[in-house]
Image (spheres, grey):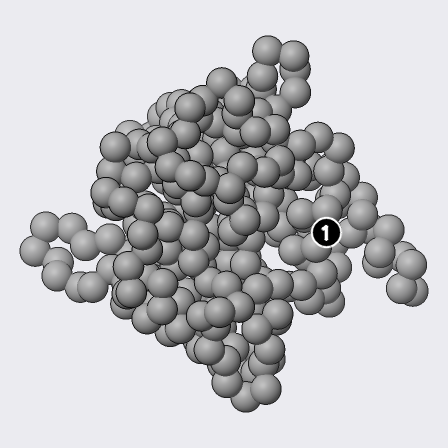
């Protein structure tokens, strides 16, 4: 509910809230089993993604991951190879059939103890790289990677710029950063609440990607990702105040910017007329 509000809430009346892409259509998949439901969550994510794309969804938000269950920095064979192979095969199959899309995944909020790790440890799309991609029907590994955006959390620093949140996973798998600390959005009780996490940062980017694609439905997923991740004026800087437990890859990340991304989408659309 909180994630959906960030993407597309449309009550811009000074009391309630308006999401990033507030004229969007949302399709939601229940992937986590409740009491007396025994389905496999990995399969629910796998088939849910496929069904969403076939239903017409273009930007799929995944505010989920597995790093919070980890005690070490290792991915494990299942996360590193089996799940990623299945997801990449599914993505290539959909692309070969003419579907296009972007998968936006949260980078994760550290391990079991909350210690940030490299974002590929969050599994699923964040763990996909050229070394573990399997494709079908002539689709290339680059075409898969060009449709994955992994989002780190950032917040304002003391100087008015942006710094990576002390809970966010980091590393080369991260594509872009977005606000993820004390984000105000919808709650299940019909009200509103503040929550923090990369699960809040990812839907900001999902909303921006949706805005960009709405400018020009003929864009490819690759074009949309490039616009979203390259249209920025600020960076989310390395958090030098945090002492990282793991040996992580520390990098600055582009800070997503809806205004600049939409302006670039408009420019590219007119340049091609």
Task: Give left or right: position of 117 versus 218.
Answer: left
Whether residue 227 is situated above or below residue 52 in the rendered picture: above
Q: In which quadrant will I find the C terminus?
A: bottom right
Task: Give left or right: position of 35 versus 97.
Answer: left
Q: Which of 83 and 29 lies nearest the eye of the viewer?
A: 83
- Tell me where residue 208 appears, x and y as whole percent: 63, 44
Q: In which quarter of the image is residue 71?
A: top left
Residue position for label 1: 227
**Can residue 81 be spotted in the picture?**
yes
Whether residue 45 is situated above or below residue 107 in the rendered picture: below
- Residue that appears at 57% across and 25% down: 163
Q: In which quarter of the image is residue 99?
A: bottom right
- Residue that appears at 70% across and 55% down: 226
Whether residue 242 is situated above or below residue 48 in the rendered picture: above
- Residue that appears at 61% across and 24% down: 162
Judged from this view, the residue extending furthest toward the front is 247
- Tell me where residue 153 appears, x and y as whole percent: 50, 34
Q: Which of 160 and 169 lies nearest the eye of the viewer?
A: 169
SS at badge 1? helix
Q: In which quadrant will I find the N terminus?
A: top left
């Amino acid at each position: 509910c909180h994630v959906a509000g960030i993407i597309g809430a449309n009550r811009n009346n000074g009391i309630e809230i308006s999401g990033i892409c507030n004229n969007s259509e949302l399709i939601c998949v229940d992937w986590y089993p409740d009491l007396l439901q025994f389905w496999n969550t990995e399969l629910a994510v796998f088939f849910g993604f496929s069904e969403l794309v076939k239903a017409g969804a273009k930007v799929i938000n995944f505010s989920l991951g597995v790093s919070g269950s980890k005690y070490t920095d290792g991915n494990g064979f299942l996360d590193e190879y089996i799940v990623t192979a299945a997801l990449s095969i599914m993505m290539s199959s959909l692309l070969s059939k003419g579907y296009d899309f972007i998968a936006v995944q949260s980078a994760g909020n550290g391990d079991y103890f909350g210690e940030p790790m490299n974002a590929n440890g969050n599994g699923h799309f964040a763990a996909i790289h050229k070394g573990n991609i399997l494709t079908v029907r002539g689709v290339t590994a680059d075409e898969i990677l060009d449709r994955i955006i992994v989002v780190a959390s950032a917040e304002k620093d003391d100087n008015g710029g942006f710094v990576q949140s002390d809970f966010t996973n980091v590393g080369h798998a991260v594509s872009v950063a977005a606000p993820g600390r004390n984000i105000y959005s919808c709650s299940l009780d019909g009200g509103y609440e503040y929550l923090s996490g990369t699960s809040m940062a990812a839907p900001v980017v999902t909303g921006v990607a949706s805005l960009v694609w709405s400018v020009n439905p003929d864009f490819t997923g690759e074009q949309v990702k490039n616009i979203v991740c390259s249209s920025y004026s600020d960076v989310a800087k390395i958090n030098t105040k945090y002492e990282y437990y793991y040996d992580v890859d520390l990098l600055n990340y582009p800070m997503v910017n809806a205004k600049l991304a939409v302006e670039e989408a408009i420019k590219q659309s007119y340049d091609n007329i």
